Amino acid sequence: MTTPIAGEGGVDAYGKLAELGLTLPKVVPPLASYVPAVQTGNYVYVSGQLPLVDGKLPQTGKVGTDVAPERATELARLCALNGLAAIEGLVGLGRVVKVVKLTGFVNSAPGFTGQPAVINGASNLFGEVFGEQGRHARSAVGVAELPLDSPVEVEIIVEIA
């Protein structure tokens, strides 16, 4: 069973973003041979999103040495915001009925084990924007490297009406 969309008793994602003082950025152009998001059936799969702001990474490096975990959490939130922009660009946020799965990758220094707390930056944004509909399954994975030496990357699956 799916949750109703906005206008049918669902969450007004646009209103929530405005309440949070957030504006959707422009969709981040792909860095290689892929698209930002693709729809199949009632699902949208969002490609890995980096915390790009105006086409640039605000910080690079490994979390736990070059990047403080708290800063990486903020960057994960930016990844999620870029993911919302990709969804908006493909089908519109008003069609989202459920955030299904979030996978977060953390460019981790040796011995850094705080990946779940870092990826909370993305998870918490979805909770703030979609409420209960933003609660999702999740993986938080430490990796040796990420594209452009990004500290974090997030990919998302949402169900749409």
Image: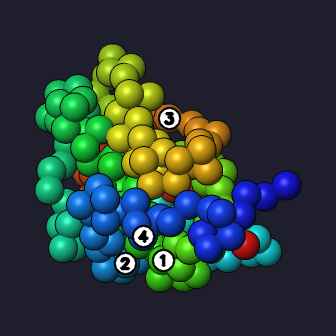
Q: Which residue is mark 3?
A: 140
The residue furthest right is: 1
Q: Which residue is mark 1?
A: 88
**Quadrant where the N terminus is found in the figure:** bottom right
Residue type pointed to by label 3: Ala
The residue carrying pointer 3 sits among few (fewer than 14), some (14 to 19) or many (20 or more) residues within 10 Å by Cα, namely: some
The residue under the point 36% across, 62% down is 17
Which of discs 1 and 3 lies nearer the camera? The answer is 1
The residue under the point 62% across, 73% down is 7
Dot 4 or dot 1: first in sequence order is: 4
Asked whether, in this view, residue 6 is left or right of residue 129, the answer is right
The residue under the point 73% across, 58% down is 3
Q: Position of residue 65 (x, y in %)?
A: 17, 28
- The reply to whether dot 3 and dot 4 touch (C-beta < 8 Å) is no
Q: Which residue is mark 4?
A: 14
Which of discs 3 and 2 lies nearer the camera? The answer is 2
Secondary structure, mark 1, is helix
**Quadrant where the C terminus is found in the figure:** bottom right
- The reply to whether dot 4 and dot 2 touch (C-beta < 8 Å) is no
Q: Nearer the viewer, residue 153 or 80?
A: 80
Q: Quadrant of residue 22?
A: bottom left
